[in-house]
Image: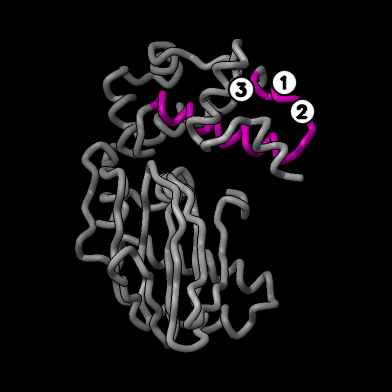
């Protein structure tokens, strides 16, 4: 998993609102330290108490959020894609906690909870060592590991499909096969034959583990890869479309715009 897929930001709030751009399809953890902050939302304000974690996810909408505090108050934002969370879960425990399960099932989700002792300690160390990049990276992953660790939650449940380890391995093999050659995506029938799993179990298991259908996963993965390739500035738009298996460039452009709200060319130009 690349570091770029999980972003840590330290925000310093004040009586003047501080804006933050939320991007659809990403999971945000807003984590406070010893002082609370507030999020103005229309006619109301959502309080984030001291030592709390607020998980926010919206599959379709991107918008501006704002944060205020009575005095200068630092807090942290950890931002990751839903695909990255799926990856964390698929590589780790087979148990899903209530937060993970709810994210998979809804287009929008938010959840408050008190920060654990581990998260509090990590927050303190991050804020005390803001210029230490390696420490911040380590603490970022420690927070995620603690927050999404189902073993400490009584509300964890077992996914019946995941009880069959062989099935899990085959579904993961299917995912790796899908992303190994984006130019030539197999049909469901071909994929099921490749991993020796019947089509029903493949589709069901894939949705259980990665939170979306095979088609949706491939489409989202291609768009993430497209964005990554554009950022590298090594290929023309048509070349990227070809690498991702689009025989019609206009179809690629439409898919990219639907995902990110802007055409590939405009996104490229916005990079300066």
| Earlier sequence position, callout 2 versus callout 3 | 2
Q: Closer to the N terminus: mark 3 or mark 1?
A: 1
- Structural crowding at the residue carrying mark 1, measured as other residues with C-alpha within 10 Å and reported as few (<14), some (14–19) or many (≥20): few
Front position in the image: 61 or 98: 61
* CB under 8 Å between discs 2 and 1: yes
Circle 1 — which element? helix
Which residue is labeled 3 in the image? 244
Q: Nearer the viewer, mark 2 or mark 3?
A: 2
Question: Which residue lies at the image location 26% right of the left edge and 43% below the top edge?
Answer: 105
Give the crowd class for mark 2: few <14, some 14-19, many >=20 residues within 10 Å.
Answer: few
Task: Choose mark 3 or mark 1, whichever is in front.
Answer: 1
Do tag 2 and tag 3 residues touch (Cβ < 8 Å)?
A: no
Q: Is residue 145 visible?
A: no
Name the image quarter holding residue 56.
Answer: bottom left
Magenta includes 44? no
Point out residue 32 in the picture as x, y percentages from the top left corner: 43, 78
Q: Tag 2's secondary structure?
A: loop
Q: What residue is pinned by disc 2?
A: 235
Q: Position of residue 272 (x, y in %)?
A: 77, 45
**Residue lying furthest front in this view?**
43
Badge 3, how many Cα within 10 Å: few under 14, some, many 20+?
A: many
Q: Residue 239 has which mark? A: 1
Disc number at residue 13?
Answer: none
Q: Residue 230 placed where, x, y %?
A: 70, 35
Q: Residue at x 35, y 28 (%)?
A: 213
Using the image as rendered, state which of residue 233 and residue 217 is in the foreground. Answer: 233
The Cα–Cα distance between marks 3 and 1, rounded to whole angstroms, is: 9 Å
The x and y percentages for residue 214 are 40, 26
The residue shown at (47%, 82%) is: 15
* Magenta residue span: 214-241
């Amino acid at each position: 998993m690349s570091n770029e897929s999980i972003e840590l930001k330290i925000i310093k709030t004040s009586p003047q609102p501080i804006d933050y751009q939320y991007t659809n399809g990403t999971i945000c953890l807003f984590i406070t330290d010893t002082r609370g902050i507030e999020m103005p939302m229309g006619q109301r304000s959502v309080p984030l108490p001291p030592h709390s974690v607020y998980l926010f996810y919206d599959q379709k909408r991107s918008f501006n959020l704002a944060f205020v505090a009575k005095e200068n108050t630092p807090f942290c934002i950890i931002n990751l894609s839903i695909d990255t969370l799926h990856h964390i879960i698929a590589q780790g425990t087979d148990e899903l906690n209530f937060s993970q399960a709810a994210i998979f099932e809804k287009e929008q989700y938010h959840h408050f909870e008190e920060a654990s002792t581990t998260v509090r300690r990590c927050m303190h160390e991050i804020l005390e060592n803001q210029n230490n990049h390696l420490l911040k990276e380590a603490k970022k992953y420690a927070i995620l590991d603690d927050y999404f660790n189902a073993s400490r939650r009584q509300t964890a449940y077992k996914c019946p499909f995941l009880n069959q380890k062989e099935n899990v391995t085959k579904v993961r093999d299917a995912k790796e096969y899908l992303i190994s050659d984006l130019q030539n995506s197999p049909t469901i029938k071909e994929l099921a034959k490749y991993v020796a799993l019947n089509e029903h179990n493949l589709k069901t298991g894939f949705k259980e583990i990665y939170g979306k259908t095979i088609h949706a996963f491939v489409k989202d993965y291609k768009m993430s890869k497209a964005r990554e390739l554009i950022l590298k500035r090594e290929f023309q738009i048509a070349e990227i479309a070809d690498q991702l298996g689009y025989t019609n460039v206009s179809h690629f452009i439409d898919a990219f715009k639907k995902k990110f709200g802007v055409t590939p060319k405009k996104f490229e130009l916005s990079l300066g």
